[in-house]
């Protein structure tokens, strides 16, 4: 609804009105003063003129008598005649001036009784003067007046001069009393106007003081209410200006929540930069840049806000989790300030984390249980015993290593390779808890692998992480024990390698599909192993270690994402073939092939140079065969960031290590964008005697 | 509303164009459909749209560079980024370059309409 126009002046309306009246009154008094002074000047002029009439009448009488004397004594008469002429003219003009002056005064509304009386007196004076004036005109009209000519006017002068002087005197008195009367009226009017102006002035002062008191009262009440609100709210509330400064009004809890040393005027962004984790700083800075953008809508600000459940480290060092909410405070079209609300959500975040941990623990245990139920107990048993044996061996090596840098480094690399094998087997069995713990363990080892300056202290975290892996395997044992309580099924005969191979192949299939699904790729696996093939347990253990690494490598590095495959005209789903055969000479052939990118020496050169495993010069100096051979060396990976499935450069190194130990051969063949095949061969003697 | 739709996918362009006929948006004139950044700039110069939906990953001139140019060319126009790039840093960069809204692909019809209505408030 449109507000009425008068309200534009708001509470000042009465004041403005009073001041306007005051100014009008003042201007009125000034104008009246001007007018009054003009009237008084006119009155004075008329009084003077009336006085002059007496003088002119006297002058005329004197000039006539002088003329009479001069004519009688035959003396020159020019001076007398000139004086008669001057007196006559001055008298006549004075009468005319008085007449017009009195008419003017009557016209201006000041026709007082005194004024009318003066008019009558003037008329009588004119009547008395008229014959004398006529005689003077006649005399002045004669060429050479004689004594007799003057006698007539001289008689009139004798007869009327006294009367004329008396009348002029009366007229002067009358005019004086008229002027007095008029000036008294004007004074009264002036006094009234000044009185009114004074009253108006008093009104203005009164009104002004009252309005000031009223607004002070409202402001004080508002201030008290704001203070009460700011003292009561649990959230941190404050305003931030365009320069990022904290305003003076803020909730009492604010500085308890953020920092007691903080004061109004401090820069909030600079403060936050010191207290939040480094990884959030850039996005918080960017966010502050758009906060004052008037076109950015509140819902978008909420969406972009990085200060949600943010870890905040105050000076006392105890991390809290805070939510910051921002609302733009606009003045007209511009965003002048931000209203910032801070919530302490530490309790909520901690609870959510505890819940997530508990859920994860339960899930891991359930997963372990389900994974165990999926597999042959003998296989799981064999894995767990093998894993524990390897962990025990690592422990003893850690205890007995020579205390010098290079020996530590060598040990770290051996340990890394060993646990990577355990990880692959755990993954194949779907034992996520063990797989995850080993992944964390590998992350602990990673920064130590290239250092020659290692000390015993550097290995402390390794021992701690080893303990976690131990605990994970122990948990699986516990689950097995619990399951055994309920188990009443027929136990599979140990050493039934036929079913163990089938079991292994099924695990490999599951592993392939799981890795593909984790990486958002589409892949299937075709497995071929002749049913009549009988493999000893040691070869099965060999396969259990090597096959997971090879199919993992095929899915991670070989198979392209579905869109990429589609672009290349391949089926969206990649195919991995895993074949185990025995030829006529008894040689065991194991191959894993994918229909993906193929191996490109040039691409490997570039990747190794980019992820820093080789310098650009080293990469360029190696032949194609040499660069391909690098993928079997520990620490060489074609992935920049290690993930759970690849990136540490240990998988193929382990395969290489195993085949070397068995005295077998390893070949790679590949065609760009068509296939990559890893072929392992074990001579009859090697695998049948193992 | 004079709407220009910028996206390298014809399917997305057509989808937005169909949704723009919704009565909630009032009268909408689709003044341009562009498949890349350069085409978008040329159309913006001649057609002067007041609302623009903009993809970020496009051939020739990418969305971010295009937004900066459009913001200079049409300072009063409202730009809604419709992109599959979901990280906060991308969104903030787009807003700093001159966009005023951000919608993630794939979007629901309702979300696009709400974003356009809010943008034009």
Image (cartoon, rainbow, N blue to C red):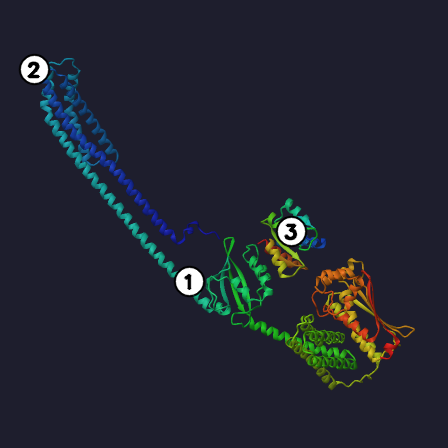
Q: Residues within 10 Å of mark 1 (few under 14, many from 20)?
A: few
Q: Image check: A201 left or right of A598? A: left
- Chain letter of the residue carrying label 1: A
Check disc 1 and report the residue beneath it: A222
Circle 3 is placed at which residue position? B66
Task: Give the quarter of the image for residue A135.
Answer: top left
Co-location on one chain, circles 2 and 1: yes
Residue bearing mark 2: A73
Residues marked 2 and 3 touching at CB (< 8 Å) = no
Front tag of 2 and 1: 2
Residue B101 place in picture, x, y as percent: 61, 56
Residue at image coords 78%, 78%: A375
**For the residues carrying marks 2 and 3, which lies nearer the camera in this image?**
3
Q: Which element is circle 3 on?
A: helix
Q: Chain of mark 3?
A: B
Q: Residue at x 73, y 78 (%)?
A: A370
Q: Which of the two residues, B69 or A456, is positioned nearer the viewer here? A: A456
């Amino acid at each position: 609804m449109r507000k009425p126009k008068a309200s534009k002046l708001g509470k000042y309306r009465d004041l403005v009105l009073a001041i306007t009246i005051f100014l009008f009154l003042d201007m009125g008094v000034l104008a009246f003063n001007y007018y009054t002074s003009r009237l008084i000047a006119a009155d004075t002029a008329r009084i003077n003129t009336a006085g002059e009439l007496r003088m002119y009448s006297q002058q005329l009488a004197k000039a006539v008598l002088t003329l009479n004397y001069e004519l009688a004594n035959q003396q020159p008469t020019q001076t007398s005649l000139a004086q008669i002429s001057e007196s006559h003219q001055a008298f006549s003009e004075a009468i005319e001036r008085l007449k017009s002056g009195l008419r003017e005064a009557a016209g201006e509304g000041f026709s007082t009784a005194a004024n009318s009386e003066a008019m009558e007196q003037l008329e009588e004076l004119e009547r008395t003067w008229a014959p004398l004036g006529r005689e003077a005109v006649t005399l002045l009209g004669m060429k050479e007046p004689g004594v007799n000519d003057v006698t007539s006017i001289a008689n009139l002068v004798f007869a009327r001069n006294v009367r004329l002087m008396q009348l002029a005197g009366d007229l002067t008195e009358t005019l004086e009393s008229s002027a007095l009367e008029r000036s008294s009226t004007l004074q009264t009017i002036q006094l009234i106007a000044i009185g009114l102006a004074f009253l108006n002035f008093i009104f203005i002062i009164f009104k002004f003081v009252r309005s000031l008191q009223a607004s002070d009262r409202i402001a004080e009440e508002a201030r008290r209410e704001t203070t009460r609100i700011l003292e009561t709210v649990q959230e941190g509330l404050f305003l931030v200006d365009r320069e990022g400064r904290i305003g003076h009004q803020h909730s009492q809890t604010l500085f308890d929540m953020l920092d007691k040393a903080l004061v109004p005027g401090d820069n909030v962004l600079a403060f936050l930069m010191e207290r939040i984790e480094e990884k959030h700083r850039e996005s918080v800075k960017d966010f502050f840049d758009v906060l004052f953008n008037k076109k950015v809508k509140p819902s978008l600000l909420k969406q972009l806000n990085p200060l949600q459940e943010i870890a905040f480290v105050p000076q006392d060092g105890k991390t809290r989790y805070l939510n910051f909410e921002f609302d733009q405070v606009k003045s007209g079209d511009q965003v002048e300030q931000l209203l910032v609300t801070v919530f302490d959500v530490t309790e909520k975040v901690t609870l959510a984390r505890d819940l997530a941990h508990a859920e994860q623990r339960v899930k891991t245990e359930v997963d372990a249980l389900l994974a165990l139920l999926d597999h042959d107990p003998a296989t799981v048993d064999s894995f767990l015993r093998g894993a524990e044996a390897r962990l025990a061996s690592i422990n003893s090596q850690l205890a007995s290593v020579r205390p010098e840098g290079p020996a530590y480094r060598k040990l770290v690399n051996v340990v890394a390779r060993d646990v990577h094998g355990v990880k692959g087997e755990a993954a194949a069995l779907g034992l996520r808890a063990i797989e995850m713990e080993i992944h964390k363990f590998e992350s602990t080892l990673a920064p130590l692998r290239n250092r020659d300056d290692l000390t015993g202290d550097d290995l402390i975290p390794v021992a701690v992480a080893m303990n976690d892996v131990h605990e994970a395997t122990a948990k699986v044992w516990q689950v097995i024990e619990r399951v055994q309580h309920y188990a009443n099924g027929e136990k599979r005969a140990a050493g039934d390698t036929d079913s163990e191979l089938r079991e292994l192949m099924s695990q490999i299939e599951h592993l392939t599909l799981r890795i593909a699904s984790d990486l958002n790729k589409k892949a299937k696996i075709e497995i071929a192993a002749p049913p009549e093939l009988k493999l000893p347990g040691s070869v099965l253990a060999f396969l259990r270690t090597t096959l997971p690494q090879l199919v993992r490598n095929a899915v991670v590095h070989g198979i392209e994402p579905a869109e990429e495959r589609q672009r290349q005209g391949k089926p969206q789903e990649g195919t991995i073939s895993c074949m185990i055969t025995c030829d006529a000479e008894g040689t065991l052939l194991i191959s894993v092939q994918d229909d993906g990118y193929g191996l490109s020496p040039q691409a490997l050169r570039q990747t190794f140079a980019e992820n820093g495993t080789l310098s650009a010069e080293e990469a360029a100096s190696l032949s194609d065969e040499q660069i391909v051979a690098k993928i079997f060396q520990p620490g060489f990976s074609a992935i920049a960031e290690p993930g759970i499935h690849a990136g540490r450069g240990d998988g193929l190194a382990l395969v290489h290590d195993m085949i070397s130990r068995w005295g077998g051969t390893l070949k790679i063949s590949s065609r760009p964008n068509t296939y990559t095949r890893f072929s392992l061969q074990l001579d009859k003697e090697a695998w049948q005697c193992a | 509303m004079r709407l220009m739709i910028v996206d390298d996918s014809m399917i997305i362009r057509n989808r937005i164009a169909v949704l723009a006929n919704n009565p909630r948006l009032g009268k909408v004139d689709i003044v341009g459909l562009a498949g890349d950044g350069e085409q978008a700039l040329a159309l913006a110069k001649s057609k002067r749209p007041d609302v623009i939906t903009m993809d970020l990953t496009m051939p020739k001139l990418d969305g971010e560079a295009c937004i900066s140019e459009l913001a200079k060319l049409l300072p009063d126009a409202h730009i809604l980024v419709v992109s599959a790039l979901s990280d906060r840093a991308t969104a903030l960069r787009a807003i700093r370059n001159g966009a005023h809204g951000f919608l993630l692909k794939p979007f629901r019809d309702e979300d696009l309409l709400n974003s356009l209505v809010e943008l034009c408030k």
